[in-house]
Image: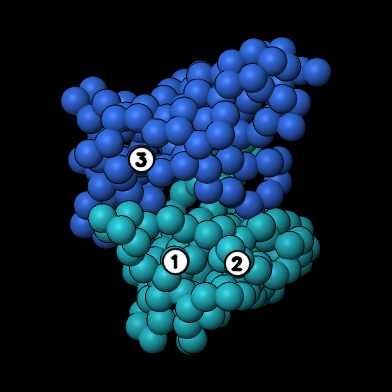
Amino acid sequence: SQQGEEDPQALSIQEGENATMNCSYKTSINNLQWYRQNSGRGLVHLILIRSNEREKHSGRLRVTLDTSKKSSSLLITASRAADTASYFCARQARSNYKLTFGKGTLLTVNP
Amino acid sequence: GAVVSQHPSRVICKSGTSVKIECRSLDFQATTMFWYRQFPKQSLMLMATSNEGSKATYEQGVEKDKFLINHASLTLSTLTVTSAHPEDSSFYICSATWGQGASGANVLTFGAGSRLTVL
């Protein structure tokens, strides 16, 4: 399976704290994307990082990519209760448009 | 921004019946649409890739006769679950793209999902 692993599977923090989620993959990628999913809803695209990039920022989000280790991390700073959701990384292969999703991290931010 | 509408959001049907789920790109032409299936608290599993005007490409293990996909226009793809059984109960999510952006990066826009319950 091309699915990688995300850790932790679940993360519970207090509002204002930072949350870090990690994602590992097995095959070469064109880019890696992070998505958010609220319970029972569709996915919302958060940020995309290309294989030749090492770090990217978007608001309170910071994504890093280490292609030598085949891993990525998503950092959410100064978390809010509204950040409570599942977060998925998705790898896009070089050869096609397909996205392969990781297992996700369920983030709970307690007020 | 790009919007994908998925309908119905919830459907309950009897075992043996067929159910059709629609996925529409509202403000862009979707050259490619993807159908995913998600079990509770699990990841999204790609079922098939649908290109306008051609047959869908199914992932290994997905029954093409069970899950009929039609992408008749650049704004509409449909997934029909034929002769549904309780084990087909799941959350089905479509996504669409208009093609590659800069550097070949491809961002998908997702529908809100359809929760199918087969009794």
Residue drawn at x 44%, y 66% as measured from the top left: B97
Q: Chain of mark 2?
A: B
User: What hue represents chain A?
Assistant: blue
Q: In the image, residue A18 lies at what x, y percent?
A: 59, 16
Q: CA distance from mark 2 to mark 1?
A: 10 Å
Q: Are marks 3 and 1 in contact (CB under 8 Å)?
A: no
Q: Chain of mark 1?
A: B
Kind of residue at disc 3: Ile
Chain in cyan (letter): B
Residue position marked by numbered label 1 in the rendering: B97
Q: In the image, residue B1 lies at what x, y percent?
A: 58, 63
Which mark, by number, is residue A49? 3
Residue drawn at x 37%, y 57% as measured from the top left: B106
Q: Is residue A69 visible?
A: yes
Pointer 1 local density, CA inside 10 Å: few below 14, some 14–19, many at least 20 = many
Is residue B51 or residue B107 the one in the foreground?
A: B107
* Left or right: residue A88 compared with residue A31: right
Give the answer, above or below, for where A26 lies relative to B117: above
* Left or right: residue B91 compared with residue B51: right
Residue position marked by numbered label 2 in the rendering: B4
Secondary structure under badge 3? strand
Q: Are marks 2 and 1 on the same chain?
A: yes
Secondary structure under badge 2? strand
Is residue A92 or residue B82 the one in the foreground?
A: A92
Q: Quadrant of the C terminus of chain A?
A: top right
Is residue B106 or residue A90 the one in the foreground?
A: B106
Q: Is residue B35 visible?
A: no
**Which is in the foreground here, disc 3 or disc 2?**
3
**Which is in the foreground here, disc 3 or disc 1?**
3
Secondary structure under badge 1? strand
